[in-house]
Amino acid sequence: MDKEISEYLSKKNKKEEVPKKNFLISFMNKILVCCILVITCLILMKSSTKFKSLLESKVYHDNMSFAYFNNLYNKYFGKVLPSYETEEVTPVFNEKLEYESVNRYFDGYKLDVKNNYLVPIIESGIVVYSNDMENFGKVIIIEGIDGVDIWYGNLNNINVKLYDYVTKGNFLGEVNDNTLYLVFQKDKEYLEFDKYFKN
């Protein structure tokens, strides 16, 4: 028994021994890449009025998907801060949306679900709204990586906070009265349930 415990502790200690040098190099490389991108944009803005007006329209006038850029950054550069994690983490809750029926409800849809239903996140993204909304109750809006804002209404026991990055299939919250409201919106237009969502 003592031998098993000592083996476990030695394995655990080896995992925790991450060289600080690698951490620092990784972090400095990310800062360097970000600086190069910013300087390149500034040079292009100064030298080209066409690029400047294009950038201004995309940043100040269009609905820019921060979830998309966050996903892109994580894909090519990893997390913002280097992590000591060495093992893949498996989520405890990883479900798909299940419902009994769907009906139109204002600009969205009313789904009949089981009592005390645990609502999964339909698409990965960033939580951009968390508050009460007339006719929808407690609402969470997640800006998806595909640019679609998904409104989840009539929630209780919410598991996310404003500006959290959330992953598809994870636990969002709970509904207690068999009703979940969903709204799909992109570029200020409401999307049809069956065209966007495929169960």
Image (cartoon, rainbow, N blue to C red):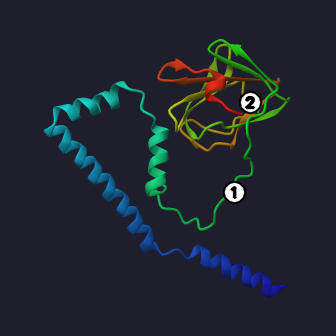
According to the picture, the residue beneath numbered tag 2 turns out to be 156
Residue at 16% from the left image edge and 36% from the top image edge: 48
- Verify CB contact (< 8 Å) between mark 1 and mark 2: no
> Does residue 155 lie above or below 40 as drawn?
above
Quadrant showing the C terminus: top right
Q: Is residue 89 visible?
A: yes
Pointer 1: what residue?
90
| Vertical comparison of 79 with 188: above or below | below
**Quick one: quadrant of the N terminus?**
bottom right
Judging depth in this view, the residue of 138 and 199 nearest the camera is 199
Front-most of 171 and 156? 171
Please tell me whether mark 1 sits on a helix, a strand or a loop.
loop
Distance from disc 1 to disc 2, alpha carbons, whole Å, reads: 25 Å
Under mark 1, the amino acid is Thr
When the figure is inspected, residue 21 is found, relative to residue 43, above or below; the finding is below
Q: Earlier in the sequence, mark 1 or mark 2?
A: 1
Toward the left, the furthest residue is 47
Instruction: Provide residue 137's location: percent of width, then percent of height.
Output: 69, 20
**Location of residue 148 (image quadrant):** top right
Q: Position of residue 164 (x, y in %)?
A: 56, 41
Three-letter code for the amino acid on which mark 2 is drawn: Asn
Residue at left 47%, top 45%?
70
Q: Which disc, if any, is residue 18?
A: none
- Residue, x 55% and y 28% (percent of image)? 149
